[in-house]
Each structure stands twice: as C-alpha cells, then as structure tokens.
Amino acid sequence: MINNPIVNDFLEQIVGADDLKNIKAIIQALIDGIDTDEAIHEKTEIKLNTVRKLLYKLHDASIANYKRNKDPETQWFTYTWRFEKEEYIEEITKFYEHRLNERQSALDNLENNLYFVCCMEPEHFKGDYAESSEFEFYCPVCDYELEPYDAKKEKSLLKRRITIDKKNFKKFEEAVNE
C-alpha cells in the first residue's frame, strides 16, 4: 500500500522528492502502531525535527491526525499520532482520478485538434488551428511560418502513461483490499 508508483507520486506532491523515503518510513511506522514523534524518530532514525515536519504535512493532507496531551509534571505537550487509512486511500484515489482525467483530456485534445508550431523553434509557439489562424500562421515570437505539429510521440507517451497509471492503480486497490 506504500510501495506503488502512484503512491510515490502522491506523496512526492505532499513532501517533495527529497523526503519521499522519510515520509514512507513514517507512514509505515504509523501503520505499525507507533504513535509518538519520539518513537517514530527512534524506530526510523530520522531526525526528530524532520519527523515532526513530515507528520504535520501528513496532517495538512488529512492523512494523519493527532491528539495533544499535557504532562502534568513537566507541563510539556505530547502528541499522539494516528494514521487515517481511509483518508489516505481516498486522497490517493482523488489524485489518481485527477491525473488520469488530465492525461485523458490532453490525449483527446491532441486527437481531436490540429496543432501548429513554429518551424524554426517549436518552443516559441504551439497552438491549435484557431489560435494559429489568429496569427495568420506566423509565429508570434519570431515571425517565421507555423507548420503542422506531429503529435504522434506525445499521443503515444500519453497513452503509455495512462496504461501504466491504470495498472498501478489496480495494484494499489488490490493491496488495499488484502
């Protein structure tokens, strides 16, 4: 349920690529029933401040919740953390569906429209027929002619990504249902 490319992309969106390994270790610790930042720090050997920072990011994403208790002797607060499995599954599902819809929409757009690009520097301009005709089929940046854009590679890449995402999400669902 943690080792899946879609989960990785989702978690990376929350914490960034540099903390992906740490956040996965923290989630696993929470799943294993370790519920305080100090205990997570001891088990994972991640710096305590990093553990706390990442726990709060999980909280902001509704994946973890905490209770705050005050020690009557020391007057220090202790935070007891809880992994919200249902929210986690729901958020990953939303992330997957959103990404799938974006990719499918981009693919549909490429398949249903004719695009034009600058013949000298394709990065200058890429527009559909209507946008290109507004510039009379000349690049608005360098004034060279626009030429039809061959979208085969982009379509193929999107189709491959959609297929891979569907397979990975199916594996995620299977792991959740175990």
Image (cartoon, rainbow, N blue to C red):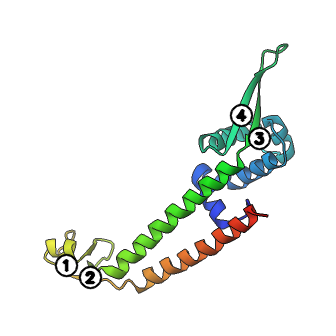
- Residue indicated by mark 1: 144
Tag 2 residue: 119
Rounded to the nearest whole Å, what is the CA distance between mark 1 and mark 4? 60 Å
Question: Which residue position holds label 3?
Answer: 47
* Nearest to the observer: residue 71 or residue 48: 71
> Of callouts 2 and 3, which one flags the residue occurring earlier in the amino acid sequence?
3
Q: In the structure shown, which secondary structural element does the residue marked by tag 3 occupy?
A: loop
Disc 2 and disc 1 in contact, CB within 8 angstroms: yes
The span from disc 1 to disc 3 (Cα, nearest Å) is 56 Å
C-beta proximity under 8 Å, tags 1 and 3: no
Left or right placement of residue 43 versus residue 169 in this view: right
How many angstroms separate mark 2 from mark 1 (CA)? 7 Å
Mark toward the start of the polypeptide (2 vs 1): 2
Mark number for residue 66? 4
Q: Is residue 145 above or below residue 30?
A: below
Label whose residue precedes the other's in the sequence (3 or 4): 3
Mark 2 Cα shell of 10 Å, populated few (<14), some (14-19), many (≥20)? some
Q: Residue drawn at (69%, 65%), measured in percent from left and top? A: 173
Neighbor class of circle 4 (other Cα within 10 Å; few <14, some 14-19, many 20+) is: some
- The kind of secondary structure element at disc 4 is strand
